[in-house]
Image: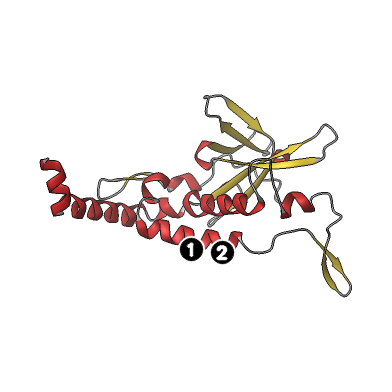
Amino acid sequence: AQDKPRDSVSTAPVFYFDASGSGKAVNAQTAIQLSTVYACVRVISEPVASLPFGVYEAKEDGNRKATEHPLYRLIHDELNSEMTSFVLREVMLVYLLLWGNSYFQIIRTGRNKITGLYSLLPDKMTVDRDKNGILAYTYMTNTGQTVVLSPEDVLYIPGLGFDGVMAYSRIALEKNAIGLRIASEGTAASSSPTVHGLLAS
């Protein structure tokens, strides 16, 4: 029988952000500036985030809302003190569509009660396995400090191509097509009379 997985490297980073065939740099930030990419992300993330979201209990006569559950208000209304449930779910979907991975840090009290979920930037996260095959999440903060989070402290939602460690980024998979579009839009913008007039002035 196969033991627990010990592969320390995910196949997902094989599809990486960088220069495309057109020579244009393609990443989540440059891709979202394309009107087509922005429209696709918005059309998917906003409606899905607006769907009903809560805690339900399975009963013999069907499911019912478990409004008395300690996590109900957190999930249904406000996942942390800065974001409503809708906003955080929208962020989750944007991260999934652009980076292919969505991470949240689970905040608990000293008595192990969950008090909130905070989103983590996917491009600041590194996922690996330790020598025992246990997943470890290493996050780079804005100040440059690295924080290692254990699996029980991270809610991870993978996208397409999940291999047990990470999922693929749709933008990285299609970087050549997106890079070509970025190059064509840049050429069209630079050749427009308005741009030439601004450059001349």
Residue 17: image location, x then y, percent? 40, 44
Residue plotted at (19% across, 52% down): 187
The residue that mark 1 highlights is 43
**Rendered image quadrant of residue 64:** bottom right
Which SS class for mark 1? Answer: helix
- Mark carried by residue 152: none
From the viewer's perspective, tell me whether residue 171 is left or right of residue 52.
left
Q: Which residue is mark 2?
A: 47
Q: The C terminus appears in which quarter of the rendering?
A: top left
Farthest residue toward the right? 60
Question: Residue 149 at x, y = what percent?
Answer: 66, 34
The answer to whether residue 28 of the structure is visible from this angle is yes
On the picture, is 20 further left or further right than 91? left
Residue 48, how many percent across, how many down?
58, 62
Marks 2 and 1 in Cβ contact (< 8 Å):
yes
Measured in 3D between alpha carbons, the distance from the residue under mark 2 to the one under mark 1, in whole angstroms, is 7 Å
